[in-house]
Image: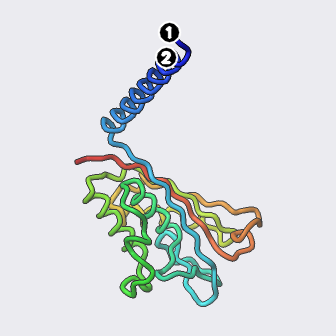
Amino acid sequence: MSDSENAAGQLASQQNASQKNASQQQNRQNTLGLKIGLGEDVHALVEGRKLIVGGVEIPFEKGLLGHSDADVLAHAVADAILGAARLGDIGKLFPDTSEKWAGADSMNLLSIAAARVREAGYEILDIDSVLTAQRPKISPYRDQMRQNLAHAMGIDVACVGVKATTSEHLGFEGREEGMSARAVALLQKVH
């Protein structure tokens, strides 16, 4: 057997092994029907706006700037569930170019996103999230945020995690120019 024939045989063997691994991975995914999604959102803090985070109005001298009520946490969660179901993101579902969504309540937007996810055949199993803001302190509002998010998605509050952190005075969050949020979602295909 020549070197070129040996190399061709090895390449074919590697391709077959790769295809077999991909097929096994696909079978595992299809069997479990689990999908994960990641959402992230950022909004600037400005004077003259209410600060609404996780559906809670928080007394503060600034609020988040956005086309809707700019609830950075609700937006990150909505993007996470939509992403897990491969349905795009909130910008696609609720474009900021549409007056229909101007000033919209983000808990309503999250409810609509959750309904779309269910229509696509998925159950929302779990959400975890983190909010980054230097101020105000989020811990007094955390339980209400969890309840609001859970209610909007129609899931048990035990399935929703909300954490908060500062950025130790670094970056735009640390300078109190804005807030950011990240969320992960675990969905399961049910039909």
Does 68 sit above or below residue 148? below
- In front here: 37 or 27? 27
Q: Position of residue 15 (x, y in %)?
A: 44, 27
Is 157 left, or right, of 135 in this rendering?
A: left
Q: Position of residue 128 (x, y in %)?
A: 50, 53
Do labels 2 and 1 touch, CB within 8 Å? yes
Label 1 secondary element: loop
Residue 118 figure quarter: bottom left
Residue 83 figure quarter: bottom left
Residue visible at 36% across and 38% down in the picture: 29
Res 5 label: 2
Does 59 sit above or below residue 151? below
Residue 79 figure quarter: bottom left
Q: Is residue 162 visible?
A: no
Q: Is residue 58 visible?
A: yes
Does 47 sit above or below residue 36? below
Is 134 left, or right, of 80 in this rendering?
A: right
Q: Position of residue 72 (x, y in %)?
A: 53, 70
Q: Which residue is mark 1?
A: 1
Q: Amino acid at mark 1?
A: Met
Q: How is the image coloured?
A: rainbow
Label 2 secondary element: helix
Quote the CA–CA distance across marks 2 and 1.
6 Å
Residue visible at 65% across and 74% down in the picture: 178
Q: Residue furthest top?
A: 1
Label 1 crowding class (10 Å Cα cut-off): few <14, some 14-19, many 20+? Answer: few
